[in-house]
Amino acid sequence: MNKMLFNIAVTALLGLGAAHAQTTPPAQPTAPAAPAAPATNRPATIVELINTDARLTTLKRAIEAAGLTQTLTGEGPYTLFAPTNDAFAKIPQADLDALLNDPERLTALLQYHMVSGNVAAAQLETMTSLPAMGGGSLTLSREGTAQRIGTAGVVVADIPTNNGTVHLIDTVLMPPSM
């Protein structure tokens, strides 16, 4: 009899609990969420970065004069060792003007600053050379804590864009053919 009373009590308690339980209405469908914004405000292309960075106005002129704008807005990825305005200022003005007015030489010079693929600063530390897009090879080294690309020092590394990586350098690299 005790067993029967126990079963009745348990059943009654379960029934009362179910009767007083709150039910949650079914969830209403919601509109799909808008795509998340990119985590960073990285420039869309290498050219967009160059066009918006006051340190690279001479490089912008050079890229336009050489006809490389379309290449550097392309899919890539590319790594560009971008000479700053201060780097171009080391070239005598008459020589720089002559270079900016010679698209063939200017293209060769700028392609010597370009590498296929995304190459981050950490990768540069483990390499001794890189093939330049215009031919030739860029020599990589370290001088103390400074990363060197040929005779140039990297002043700002790893600036990401959607089609590559840019490293600002303090000296214009001259291809061996020049």
Image (cartoon, rainbow, N blue to C red):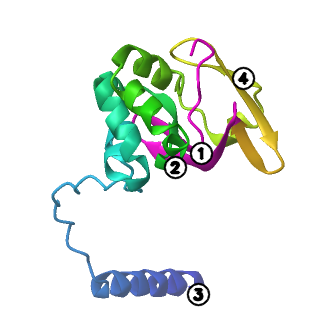
Question: x and y percent of residue 81 in the render?
Answer: 54, 35
Pick out the residue farthest to the right: 144
| Viewer-nearest of discs 3 and 1 | 1
- Circle 4 packing at 10 Å, graded few (<14), some (14-19), many (20+), is some
Residues tagged 3 and 4 counted as in contact (Cβ below 8 A):
no
Q: Going from the N terminus, do you reach mark 2 or mark 1 first?
A: 2
Check the picture and name the quadrant holding the C terminus: top right
| Label 1 secondary element | loop
Give residue 86's mark. Answer: 2
- Circle 1 packing at 10 Å, graded few (<14), some (14-19), many (20+), is many
Question: x and y percent of residue 20 in the render?
Answer: 30, 88
Mark yes or no: residue 114 visible. Answer: yes
What is the magenta range? 149-178
Question: x and y percent of residue 130 in the render?
Answer: 66, 22
Can you identify the residue that label 3 sits on? 2
**Which three-letter amino acid code belongs to the residue tagged 3?**
Asn
Mark yes or no: residue 73 visible. Answer: no
Whole-number angstrom distance, CA of label 3 to CA of label 4: 89 Å
**Which three-letter amino acid code belongs to the residue tagged 2?**
Asp
Q: Going from the N terminus, do you reach mark 2 or mark 3 first?
A: 3
Q: Going from the N terminus, do you reach mark 3 or mark 4 first?
A: 3
Can you identify the residue that label 4 sits on? 129
Whole-number angstrom distance, CA of label 4 to CA of label 1: 18 Å
- Circle 2 packing at 10 Å, graded few (<14), some (14-19), many (20+), is some
Residues tagged 2 and 1 counted as in contact (Cβ below 8 A):
yes
Can you identify the residue that label 1 sits on? 170
| Viewer-nearest of discs 2 and 3 | 2
